[in-house]
Amino acid sequence: MEDFFGSDFSKKVPNEFIQKFPGNVELWLKRDDLLHPRISGNKFRKLKYNLSEARKKSLSKLLTFGGAHSNHIAAVAAAGKKFDFKTIGIIRGEELAENPQKWSPSLRYASESGMKLEFISREEYRVKDSVAYREKLKQGFGDFYLIPEGGTNEFAIRGCAEILTKTDSEFDYICTSVGTGGTMAGILHASEEHQQILGFSALKSDYLLDEIQKMTGKTNWELILNYHFGGYAKVSADLIDFINNFYRMYQIALDPVYTGKMLFGIFELATQQFFPENSRILAIHTGGIQGIEGMNEFLRKKNWPQIIGV
């Protein structure tokens, strides 16, 4: 049961050379987005040992939380369908309950995959981690295996530690996008002393500094706070241009919430000579491609260019 997905998928993930910058700085991309079409990237890593734990406890229901555009919600729904778990998604925004025509592509996919969606108010969502609310959920849904919003817990960190393999020790910098900090914590756990781990925050707030420190005792890391583009799921014309140009050049799709922002930051920092000469950088593609459809719906309403690659 330990390897829930049945094989060592990390061996199948290629590192693709992307570009050489001035100073002989090389950028490579670990294609974790290729792990699974719907349970991809860090969602695959985070769910691996959580699903195993649910089976171990003989719990057939997964319950988790998320917003209307959550990659995590879609991934849990996909995992439930594939591995015969019932799934429940507690979704922020009660106004969506009576308006399924306004559901995001992520919510539509989750529902089509068999997930029961429960919409609650933003006020109620803020107390979702309280003992009283958890008891309310248990009364309403019976026994279930709880997966936190975004998927980060000790089992998720364990899974994310498998992102790096022995052959990745040749890299000086490991870069990842950061939402809850779990992926970065797992990478830090597996990192070697000579490696510097750079986390590119998707959030405007710097609270993740404290969150990451709680999850690791290591100090070989830095949180980059300059490439959130205004906050979670915020985008700009420059970011969209970068993502589309990246696809045209490398035929690799990037999501606009996480990996696109990280790579934008890496390219800019590399041109500013942030990285020492002869550095080798490994950036982690954490998936999230399914979220492009929802972002494109938003961009159409603003008459902005669409993100290509899907």
Image (cartoon, rainbow, N blue to C red):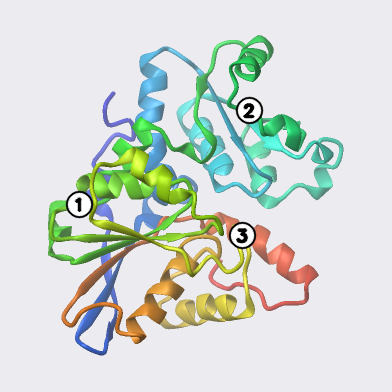
Query: Which of the 4 quarters of the picture holds residue 120?
Result: top right
Depicted 301 relative to depicted 237: above or below: above
Residue linked to disc 2: 128
Residue 191, disc: 1
Badge 3 or badge 2: first in the primary sequence: 2
Depicted 70 relative to depicted 204: above or below: above
Badge 1 or badge 2: first in the primary sequence: 2
Badge 3 or badge 1: first in the primary sequence: 1
Residue situated in front as seen by the camera: 30 or 231: 231
Residue 233, disc: 3
Q: Secondary structure at mark 3?
A: loop
> Separation of disc 3 and disc 2 at Cα?
22 Å
Specify the amino acid type for callout 3: Ala
| Image quadrant where one finds the N terminus | top left
Residue situated in front as seen by the camera: 10 or 23: 23
Q: Is residue 281 left or right of residue 149?
A: left
Q: Position of residue 16 (x, y in %)?
A: 28, 70
Q: Secondary structure at mark 2?
A: loop
Residue at image point 69% right, 46% down? 68
Depicted 197 relative to depicted 215: above or below: below
Q: Label 1: few (<14), some or many (≥20) within 10 Å? A: many
Q: Secondary structure at mark 1?
A: loop
| Image quadrant where one finds the C terminus | bottom right
